[in-house]
Image (cartoon, rainbow, N blue to C red):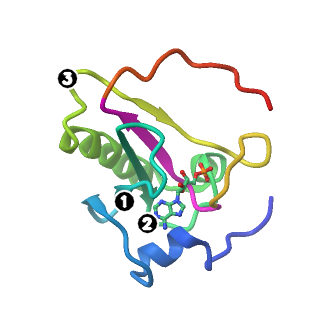
Amino acid sequence: MTSYDSENIFAKILREEIPCDKVYEDEFALAFHDITPQAPIHVLVIPKGEYISFDDFSAGASPEAMTGFYRAVQASAQKLGLGENGYRVITNIGRDGRQEVKHYHLHILGGGDMGLMKRGLA
Ligand code: AMP
């Protein structure tokens, strides 16, 4: 695995070097609107620690950091009003997952029927 690049765009958002449209923040996580939304509501949730992907985070983060992060995902969805009708959470990992930004993030997608999952091979 390659090492964490602290110049990635989400690291810059965490350092407040570039702005974001914030939804939720606590000591473990930051949630903000995706700049290119793929659904009526499309929010990214990122942990505050330096983890490249779901794979890296799951292997290396402390239980406290993991619990805090996933609670923040749920709190973000509630704050967005998605709790009643539901939503989709996805994460892209590595080359085959088409991960673009190399700081772990979950996509919260909602605000309407998200449709069936398609396999989507290029
Ligand atoms: P992924 O392919 O899972 O790495 O997705 C990266 C996501 O980050 C894409 O949906 C982009 O639209 C989004 N994105 C990139 N730059 C920004 C930014 N400055 N603010 C908000 N979202 C961004």
At mark 2, the secondary structure is loop
In this view, 66 is above or below 101? above
Q: Are marks 3 and 2 in contact (CB under 8 Å)?
A: no
- Amino acid type for the residue under numbered disc 1: Ala
Question: Which of marks 2 and 1 precedes in the sequence?
Answer: 1
Residue 84 numbered tag: 3
Residue 23 magenta-highlighted: no
Residue at 74%, 69% (x, y): give it.
3
> What's the distance in space between the residues labelled 1 and 2, CA to CA?
5 Å
At mark 1, the secondary structure is strand
Residue 41: horizontal and vertical position, in percent?
34, 41
In this view, 24 is above or below 40? below
State the residue position of label 2: 48
Question: Which of marks 2 and 3 precedes in the sequence?
Answer: 2
Please indicate whether residue 112 sits to the left or right of residue 89 in the image: left
In magenta, the rendered stretch is 102-111
Residue 103: horizontal and vertical position, in percent?
58, 61
Q: Is mark 3 within 8 Å of ligand 1?
A: no
At mark 3, the secondary structure is loop
Please indicate whether residue 29 sits to the left or right of residue 121 in the image: left
